[in-house]
């Protein structure tokens, strides 16, 4: 709910109404990142807003909740601040926060009825695939179909049918870093709906790898954007949270109902941690992007690397096939920026004549600064083997990941130190 949307003074005091001279939010993303949802507390003037660590609220009378607050599963001022903040940064009207990115996935998937389907890009987080195939489908809640929507330009058009309710994309995708043209996808959905005379499928974008600092899908025509805020939005690997943003009032109302009815809400302290992380998001994403590009170029220069995937590589043998699309829709301060996610496959051989998969394991177990861990988007650098870690759920499926693929979450350390760490691990493998 937007601050100031209620005339009840108590609620405005609790979450902090916008002062009159800030009715028109500043345009600069960097400024909004600092101030969105973080206005000084109207009651005390605290510049770090209070955390409302409460489960329930005293009411003024039967059926008369004070300021509209009844129970923290339904309403919490700290959560509302976070929802407003991310909605602002994504250019949307409504934010709905969940206990995790997976909880957000589950709620959004409920928008597809039992006789409808979800058209999904063929490279997605393993937990997303697991939910669609082992929870959503067995419950009879609709079918998910997987298509390479980042490849042939006609794939989306050909993949649609009269039952398609949601088109679900990650861009860049996890873990192959495929890039899909969001604006072109939105236009195809509009054209198809106009031609068929039916309802237009909703375009859902998982923006976790980019964050709104680099990419704002709603501005490119998407209907729903969501994040595992555990990652870049929080930025410090110290909380788990998900959030969806939309400007569609009906979609927002349904997601907010599901948020309350399913109960997958984040606690207020987790919301506070993500709010804190948002205030440095542009600074962190600039460093993640600079380091990601430096690491990708280093890997591309090595003769013992079979392939590198990074949207910012636009030249040479490892140039990303959709680098031009990425440069157009992923931007920071008006300039192309591609984030800190890099994937690569080592060549076989190396110091010990190992297979590519054996070298991948050795590399993951030999780094000093890159911690061997799942997740991504924190200030520290991480390394993982998706086939054995984050993407085990897609094993033996058409989405199965190369067992030699290594995924890096490049942090904000000194780039030279990160490159030296990878160099020694590659040399030893």
Image (cartoon, helix red, strand yellow):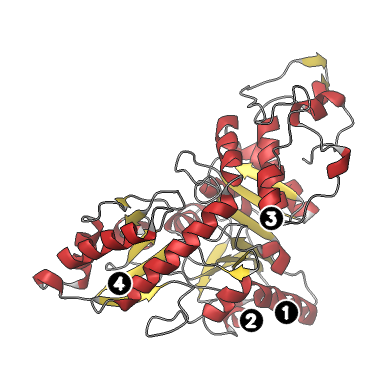
Between 26 and 67, the one nearer to me in the picture: 26
Between 14 and 284, the one nearer to me in the picture: 284
Residue 270, position as x, y percentages in the image: 55, 35
Compute the Cα span from label 2 to label 3. 34 Å
- Horizontal relation, residue 244 to residue 362: left or right: right
- Horizontal relation, residue 383 to residue 287: left or right: left
CA neighbours of label 1 inside 10 A, class few (<14), some (14 to 19), many (20+): some
Whether residue 255 can be seen here? no
On residue 157, the disc is: 2
Compute the Cα span from label 2 to label 4. 32 Å
Q: Mark 3 or mark 4: which comes first in sequence? A: 3
Q: Residue at x 50, y 41 (%)?
A: 240
Marks 2/1 in contact by CB < 8 Å: the verdict is: yes
Q: Residue at x 43, y 81 (%)?
A: 319
- Residue under numbered circle 3: 29
Circle 3 SS class:
helix
On residue 192, the disc is: 1
Circle 1 SS class:
helix
Q: Mark 2 or mark 4: which comes first in sequence? A: 2
Compute the Cα span from label 3 to label 4. 35 Å
């Amino acid at each position: 709910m937007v601050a100031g949307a209620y005339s009840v003074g108590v609620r405005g005091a609790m979450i902090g109404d916008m002062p009159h001279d800030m009715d028109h939010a500043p345009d600069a993303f960097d400024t909004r990142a600092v101030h969105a949802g973080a206005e000084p507390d109207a009651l005390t003037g605290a510049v770090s807003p209070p955390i409302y660590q409460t489960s329930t609220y005293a009411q003024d009378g039967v059926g008369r909740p004070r300021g509209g607050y009844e129970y923290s599963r339904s309403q919490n001022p700290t959560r509302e601040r976070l929802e407003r903040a991310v909605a602002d940064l994504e250019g949307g009207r409504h934010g709905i926060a969940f206990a995790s990115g997976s909880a957000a996935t589950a709620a959004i998937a409920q928008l597809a009825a039992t006789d409808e389907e979800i058209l999904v890009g063929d490279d997605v987080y393993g937990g997303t695939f697991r939910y669609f195939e082992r929870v959503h489908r067995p419950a009879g809640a609709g079918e998910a179909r997987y298509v390479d929507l980042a490849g042939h330009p006609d794939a989306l058009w050909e993949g649609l049918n009269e039952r398609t309710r949601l088109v679900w994309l990650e861009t860049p995708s996890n873990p192959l870093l495929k890039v899909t043209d969001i604006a072109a996808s939105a236009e195809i959905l509009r054209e198809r709906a106009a031609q068929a005379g039916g309802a237009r499928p909703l375009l859902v974008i998982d923006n976790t790898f980019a964050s709104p600092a680099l990419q704002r899908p709603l501005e490119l025509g998407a209907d729903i954007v969501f994040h595992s805020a555990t990652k870049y939005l929080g930025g410090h690997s110290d909380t788990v949270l998900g959030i969806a943003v939309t400007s569609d009032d009906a979609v927002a109302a349904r997601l907010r109902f599901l948020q309350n009815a399913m109960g997958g809400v984040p606690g207020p302290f987790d919301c506070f941690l993500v709010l804190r992380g948002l205030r440095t998001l542009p600074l962190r994403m600039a460093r993640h992007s600079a380091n990601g590009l430096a690491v990708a170029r280093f890997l591309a220069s090595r003769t013992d690397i079979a392939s590198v995937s990074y949207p910012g590589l636009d030249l040479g043998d490892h140039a990303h096939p959709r680098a031009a699309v990425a440069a157009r829709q992923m931007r920071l301060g008006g300039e192309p920026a591609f984030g800190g996610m890099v994937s690569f496959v080592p060549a076989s051989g190396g110091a010990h004549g190992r297979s590519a998969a054996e070298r991948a394991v050795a590399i993951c177990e030999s780094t000093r600064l890159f911690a061997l861990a799942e997740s991504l988007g924190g200030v520290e650098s991480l390394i993982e083997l998706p086939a054995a870690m984050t993407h085990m759920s897609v094993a033996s499926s058409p989405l199965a990941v190369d067992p030699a693929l290594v995924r890096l979450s490049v942090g904000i350390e000194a780039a030279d130190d990160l490159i030296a760490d990878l160099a020694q691990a590659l040399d030893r493998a």
